[in-house]
């Protein structure tokens, strides 16, 4: 899946001379956390986040009169004074997987999408990625998530899929994750049915270990002393 399929195209942008107050008001009204800043030609020159605006605020430890006076001054500054200049951006032909890795590595919540000449074409946020994940996983349809612990060897996935399809159950998606044991994997099939008692028993009878998905998640958390 490519960024062009999931990015937001209805762009809300700011010019470099927009005041911080105007940007804050706009972001609040539109319920967005990232505001791309473009020049008159439409080229990306920066991005302002809600964190940038919070960081620009005066300290709440100031007396109210001093706080209000400093706040009024701050709100009148242009966004170009607080924006991230030359922000990290991606292209529309990037994959969703690549973009997710970039976000995770660089710890950003949104990525502007530009063309080869630097013109802003869209923006991809964690909200867009979440919608893409829901679509790919098919979890917007009613169903049941199983967690099956398997030994790492060839043919295990086929055995699981065969057992599920023998019960005439449709698969929404399948994820595979590492577990605490290097020789094992956790397989998460999402079954498009809530009637899973029979297929669960067949999996157990076939030698698979089934655990509650939430329990698997809790087992992965770092242990406290």
Image: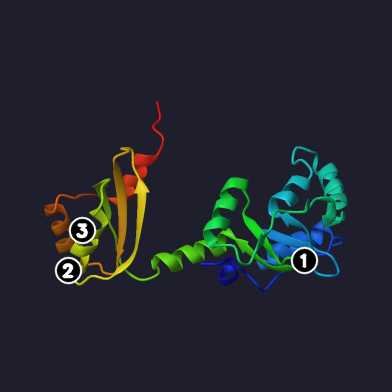
Pick out the residue farthest to the top: 225
Pick out the residue farthest to the left: 205
Residue receiving disc 1: 117
Return the residue nearer the eye: 196 or 183.
183
The correct choice, above or below, for 35 with respect to 213 in the image is below
Residue 157 place in picture, x, y as percent: 26, 56
Are there few (<14), some (14-19), or many (20+) residues within 10 Å of tag 2? few
User: Left of 55 or right of it: where is 124?
Assistant: left
User: Left of 176 or right of it: where is 79?
Assistant: right
Kindly report the distance in space between the C-alpha atoms of the residues bearing marks 1 and 2.
53 Å
Q: Earlier in the sequence, mark 2 or mark 3?
A: 3
Asked which secondary structure carries label 1, the reply is loop
User: Left of 86 or right of it: where is 155?
Assistant: left
Q: Which mark is residue 159?
A: 3
Q: Which mark is residue 166?
A: 2
Residue 166 place in picture, x, y as percent: 17, 68
Kindly report the distance in space between the C-alpha atoms of the residues bearing marks 1 and 3.
50 Å
Residue 23 place in picture, x, y as percent: 77, 61
């Amino acid at each position: 899946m490519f960024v062009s399929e999931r990015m937001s195209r209805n762009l809300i942008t700011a010019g470099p001379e927009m005041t911080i107050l105007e940007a804050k008001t706009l972001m609040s009204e539109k319920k967005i956390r990232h505001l791309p800043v473009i020049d008159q030609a439409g080229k990306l020159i920066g991005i302002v986040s809600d964190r940038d605006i919070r960081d620009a605020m005066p300290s709440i430890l100031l007396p109210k009169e001093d706080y209000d006076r400093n706040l009024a001054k701050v709100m009148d500054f242009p966004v170009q004074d607080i924006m991230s200049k030359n922000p990290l951006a991606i292209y529309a032909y990037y994959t969703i997987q690549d973009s997710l890795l970039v976000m995770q590595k660089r710890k950003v919540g949104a990525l502007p999408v530009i063309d080869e000449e630097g013109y802003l074409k869209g923006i991809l946020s964690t909200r867009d990625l979440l919608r893409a994940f829901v679509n790919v996983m098919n979890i917007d349809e009613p169903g049941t998530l199983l967690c099956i612990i398997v030994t790492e060897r060839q043919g295990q996935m086929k055995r699981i899929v065969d057992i599920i399809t023998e019960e005439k159950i449709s698969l929404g998606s399948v994820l595979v994750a590492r577990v605490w044991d290097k020789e094992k994997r956790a397989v998460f099939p999402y079954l498009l049915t809530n009637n899973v008692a029979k297929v669960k028993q067949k999996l157990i009878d076939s030698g698979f270990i089934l655990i509650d998905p939430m329990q698997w998640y809790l087992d992965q958390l770092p242990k406290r002393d």
